Image: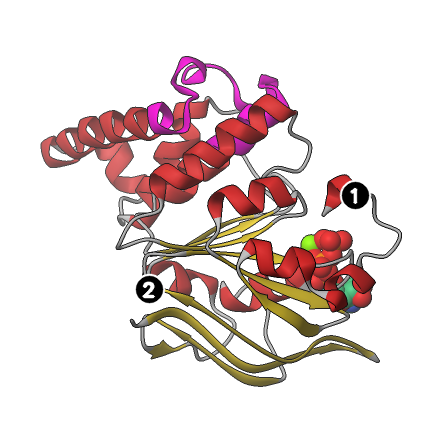
C-alpha cells in the first residue's frame, strides 16, 4: 500500500519548546488514522505542518508520494489536502450554503470578476456548484441549515458544515483537528458516522481527537503523542492498553481513554 501521508523525523521547535521531536507517522491510502495525546503534546502542530500552514525545522513530509517543500497552504490544498481547524473558521455572516460555495469558487479558480460579469459559462458552473454544495450538506446531515446564517447554527452543526466545506475542495487527504470538541453525544455519533461514510479508497483521513469511543469507531490505526514524541502506535484496542499511554494520561478520567 502507498502512504497518502508520510511524515519522517519531523521536528518543530518554538524557541526552547520542542513541539515535535523526530516524529514518524504515516496514513495509508484510503484509511483513517487518529492522532491522540494530552494537551500540548504537539497534535495541532503536526496537523499545521502537514497542511503546510506552519513550517518545520527538520524531517520530511510526503503527500501522495510528493515531498512537501515548506510553508504554502494554497499549494497544499491544490495537492489535494483539506483541513478543519481546532477553532471554528466559518464566515459567520454568510449562509451555510454560501460558505461551501466560497470554498468551491476559490479552489476552482472562479474569481470575483467572473461572478460580477456573470458569463453564461460561469452561470452554468455556478448552478452546478450550488447543487454540489447542497449534496455535501446533505452528506454532512446539515442540509436543513443550508439557508441559515452560519453564525446562528448550534456549535455541533457548524463543525459539520466545516467538514462539508473541507470536502468541497475534493481532497485526497483530510485533516481534522478535534472535530468533536464541544459536541454533545448525539452530535459526536453523527460526526463518527459522517467520517465513516466519507472514508474511501481515494480519501485518507488524519483526525485529532480525545474521545476514545469516537477514535475506535472511525480509525483503524492510532498514533499517540506525548510531549512531542510518538509513545505508541497501533489499533485503538492496542493503544488503550499500552502502558506508556496509560502513564501519559495518568490523572485523566476513565471515560477519556
Ligand atoms: N505558535 C506557537 N508559538 C509558540 N509555542 C507554540 C506555538 N504553537 C504551539 N506551541 C507549543 O507547542 C506545544 C504543542 O502545542 P500543540 O498546540 O501542537 O498541542 P496539542 O497537542 O494540539 O494540544 P491541545 O490538545 O491543547 O490542542 C505546546 O507546548 C505549545 O505551547
Ligand atoms: Mg491542538
Q: Residues within 10 Å of mark 2 (few under 14, many from 20)?
A: some
> For residue 144, what is the image quadrant?
top left
> For residue 245, what is the image quadrant?
bottom right
Q: Residue at x 31, y 44 (%)?
A: 111
Work out whether residue 210 or residue 161 is closer to the camera in this orientation and state it: 210
**Could you say where residue 5 lies in the image, as x and y percent from the top left?**
42, 69
**Could you say where residue 248 lies in the image, as x and y percent from the top left?**
80, 63
Q: Quadrant of ligand 1?
A: bottom right
Residue that protrudes farthest toward the left in the picture: 120
Determine the CA span between mark 2 and mark 1: 40 Å
Q: Residue at x 47, y 31 (%)?
A: 161
On screen, residue 181 versus residue 47, left or right, reads: right
Magenta span has 219?
A: no
Mark 2 or 1, nearer chain start = 2
The boundaries of the magenta stretch are 137-161
**Could you say where residue 189 lies in the image, as x and y percent from the top left?**
53, 29
In the drawing, what numbered circle is on residue 79? Answer: 2
Query: Split into 4 quadrants, where in the image is the N terminus?
Result: bottom left
Q: Is residue 92 visible from the viewing direction of this image?
A: no
Q: Which residue is denoted by mark 1 in the rendering?
A: 254
Q: Is residue 197 above or below residue 158?
A: below
Q: Helix or strand or loop: what does disc 2 sit on?
A: loop
Amino acid at each position: 500500500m502507498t502512504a497518502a501521508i508520510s511524515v519522517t523525523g519531523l521536528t518543530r521547535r518554538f524557541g526552547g519548546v520542542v513541539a515535535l521531536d523526530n516524529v514518524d507517522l504515516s496514513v495509508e491510502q484510503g484509511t483513517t488514522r487518529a492522532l491522540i495525546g494530552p494537551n500540548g503534546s504537539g497534535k495541532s502542530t503536526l496537523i499545521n505542518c502537514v497542511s503546510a500552514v506552519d513550517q518545520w525545522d527538520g524531517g520530511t513530509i510526503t503527500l501522495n508520494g510528493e515531498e512537501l517543500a515548506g510553508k504554502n497552504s494554497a499549494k497544499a490544498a491544490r495537492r489535494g489536502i483539506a483541513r478543519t481547524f481546532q477553532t471554528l473558521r466559518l464566515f459567520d455572516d454568510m449562509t451555510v450554503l454560501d460558505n461551501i460555495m466560497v470554498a468551491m469558487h476559490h479552489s476552482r479558480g472562479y474569481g470575483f470578476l467572473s461572478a460580477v460579469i456573470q458569463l453564461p459559462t460561469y452561470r452554468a458552473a455556478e448552478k452546478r456548484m450550488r447543487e454540489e454544495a447542497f449534496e455535501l450538506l446533505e452528506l454532512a446531515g446539515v442540509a436543513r441549515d443550508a439557508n441559515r446564517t452560519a453564525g446562528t447554527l448550534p456549535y455541533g452543526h457548524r463543525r459539520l458544515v466545516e467538514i462539508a466545506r473541507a470536502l468541497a475542495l475534493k481532497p485526497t487527504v483530510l485533516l481534522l483537528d478535534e472535530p468533536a470538541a464541544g459536541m454533545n453525544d448525539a452530535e459526536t455519533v453523527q460526526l463518527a458516522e459522517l467520517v465513516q461514510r466519507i472514508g474511501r479508497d481515494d480519501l485518507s483521513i488524519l483526525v485529532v481527537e480525545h474521545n476514545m469511543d469516537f477514535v475506535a469507531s472511525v480509525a483503524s490505526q492510532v498514533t499517540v503523542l506525548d510531549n512531542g514524541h510518538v509513545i505508541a502506535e497501533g489499533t485503538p484496542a492496542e493503544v488503550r492498553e499500552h502502558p506508556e499511554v496509560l502513564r501519559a494520561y495518568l490523572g485523566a478520567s476513565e471515560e477519556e481513554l
